Image: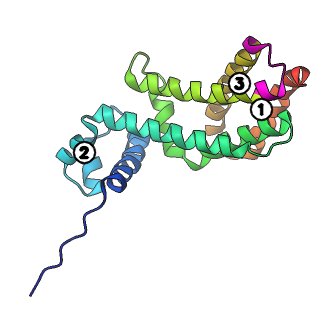
Amino acid sequence: MTTAKRKRMPRAERERQMIEIAEQVFGERGYAMASMDEIAELVGVSKPMLYEYFNSKEGLLLACIRQSRAALQEATEQSIVGADSAQEALRRGLLAFFVFIRERRQAWSLLRHEMALIGTPAADEIEETRRQQTDLITALMSGYFDSEDTLRAEASAEFVVGACERLAIWCERFPEVTPEKATEYAMDLLWAGLSQRAI
């Protein structure tokens, strides 16, 4: 009688699985209370294998943040494709952001918990996520607004990102506020000022 060998999972697929489980655990417990033993058990691998892939618990956290950043970038960039006005592009981008944090609650929770860790690699990665979003908005504004006023475009983008981040945190207290409603609230305030600069 022969015993069938268990099919080995490709490394990239295994890595995605590890990050997905780790994101859930970090999001629920916070980085400090999360255990590599628990993550390994939930994934179905040994703890040494986790370290083989990510070198450390912090390395695993950084991988989670980077994956979330890539997913957020894809969602927001795709959302504005085909927009025929600055107002529509902004509305689509904001809605994509609020939908993302509603559908990816664990990823958002992870980012929320690690925002306070100033001076750490995790905080640097989160700041890079903010920079990613401000760069996208700055590029968007440059296409619809006075392209010579680059400082105003960058300042406006920083304001949009900061305001939406705080609104997203506020929305956690009011789950009845849908992504559509949050977008409406944001547009009511943001577009009133930005529209004055539209071409």
In the rendered structure, which disc, 3 or 1, sits on the residue that comes first in sequence? Answer: 3
Q: Is residue 153 above or below residue 15?
A: above
Q: Is residue 179 above or below residue 153?
A: below
Tell me where residue 172 sits by quadrant: top right
In the rendered structure, which disc, 1 or 2, sits on the residue that comes first in sequence? Answer: 2
Q: Mark 1 vs mark 2: give the one in front.
A: 2
**Residue, disc 3:** 138
Question: Mark on residue 159?
Answer: none
Report the span colored magenta.
Answer: 141-151
Q: Is residue 71 above or below residue 148?
A: below
x then y, percent, for residue 184: 81, 39
Circles 3 and 1, Cβ within 8 Å, touching? The answer is: no
Query: What's the residue at 8%, 88% (across, down)?
Result: 1
In the rendered structure, which disc, 2 or 3, sits on the residue that comes first in sequence? Answer: 2
* Measured Cα–Cα span from mark 2 to mark 3: 38 Å
Query: What's the residue at 77%, 24% (across, down)?
Result: 142
Q: Amino acid at mark 3?
A: Thr
Circles 1 and 2, Cβ within 8 Å, touching? The answer is: no
Examine the structure image and report whether residue 150 is included in the region drawn in magenta. yes
Q: Give the structural element (helix, strand or loop) at label 1.
A: helix
Q: Give the structural element (helix, strand or loop) at label 3.
A: helix
Examine the structure image and report whether residue 34 is included in the region drawn in magenta. no
**Residue, disc 2:** 50
**Residue, disc 1:** 186
x then y, percent, for residue 136: 66, 30
x then y, percent, for residue 4: 18, 78
- Relative depth, front residue between 24 and 87: 87
Q: Is residue 111 above or below residue 127?
A: below
Report the side of 1 relative to 44 (left or right): left
Report the side of 10 relative to 197 (left or right): left
Query: What's the residue at 41%, 26% (across, down)?
Result: 122
